[in-house]
Amino acid sequence: MIKLMAALAVVGLVAAAPMTAQAQKAKAGATYKAPRGPDGKHPDLNGVWQAMNSAGWDIEPHAARAALQLRPGPFVPVPAKAVVALGAVGAVPAGLGIVEGGEIPYTVDAKKTRDENRANYLERDPEVKCYLPGVPRANYMHLPFQIFQSEKSMIIAYEYAGAVRNVLFTDPGPPPVDSWMGQSVAKWDGDSLVVTVTGMNDRTWFDRAGNHHSDQMKVEERWTPTGPGVMRYEATITDPNTFTKPWKMSFNLYKRQGDDARLNQFKCVEFVEELMYGDLRKEPLK
């Protein structure tokens, strides 16, 4: 019996070896030649794309966590002594994380702020209030986005809150003002689309775990097709006000197919009006 189990294990390793090598090649995009886009030169990125990970909850590796609890606060209109458990609905699913190396290199003070954010998530997370998600968070939320690519221009539309990015291929210079989604300037590096994002305000987060940045953050994205319906997304984050060194995240995006390849509407402002401004009613709701 022991000999049989050992033999089966060897067979399994032999069978897995070529699959592992193929997976590594696919990840690097070494053997894949993507269909050409409208200009006939560069990959066709058109379509509805979505991440399949739990980075929207926490971009670092994490175990499943207990449900959040609502505490009395400016955005939680519950009785002063009440504690409302969300049960499994508010639980955080486990995830391997998308941060390369596993840990974000925060400065000491910035990590304290992250911990405070995490402890006060319901009051502070901009997603709770339906603010625009910023970059890179918009690309790995639980909702999809669509790339519209023409011969000379590109727009990325997100289902969440109707967020939109105009991807510029001619650099207009520094952004005149900071904004939620920043300014995106792109160029092609072989079959990779490289986008530099600057001019973002400091009010967006990376996830629901309180990971944050300052208004000095710069994001360099790489969008690389690695197989039919698969694209590798990489983002290098630079922000000397918040991190001790640049760091990188990476994950796969998957192209939706069939009738599901469309964006629905998620205009969440109406969902948070009572949460944020209900206490201003002349006669508050019961």
Image (cartoon, grey):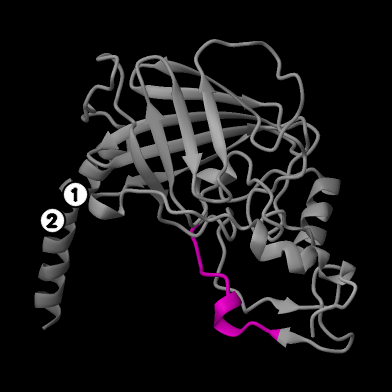
Callout 1 secondary element: helix
Q: Which residue is mark 1?
A: 19
Q: Residue furthest front?
A: 282
**Helix, strand, or loop for circle 2?**
helix
Vertical side of 3 occupied by 114: above or below: above
Q: How packed is label 1: few (under 14 Cα within 10 Å), some, or many (20 or more)?
A: few
Question: Is 94 covered by the magenta stretch?
Answer: yes
Rendered position, 39 above or below 15? above
The residue at 47%/23% (across/down) is 194
Marks 2, 1: nearer the viewer: 1
Quarter of the figure with the N terminus: bottom left
For the point 60% across and 75% down, which residue is it?
A: 90
Q: Is residue 88 magenta?
A: yes
Q: Is residue 63 left or right of residue 192?
A: right
> What's under tag 2, amino acid-wise?
Ala
x and y percentages locating residue 207 in the rendered image: 63, 54
Whether the residues at callouts 2 and 1 have beta carbons within 8 Å, the answer is: yes
Q: Is residue 122 visible?
A: no
Q: Quadrant of the C terminus?
A: bottom right
- Please state the extent of the stretch shown in magenta in the rendering: 85-96
Looking at the rendered structure, which numbered label has been put on residue 244? none
Camera-nearest residue between 24 and 277: 277
Vertically, is 121 above or below 217? below
Residue 151, percent from left and from top:
35, 16
Q: Quadrant of residue 128?
A: bottom right
Residue 38: quarter of image: top left
- Measuring 58% from the left and 75% from the top, which residue is drawn there? 91
Q: Find residue 15 and name its label.
A: 2
Q: Residue 133: x, y in percent? A: 63, 46
Amino acid at the residue labelled 1: Met
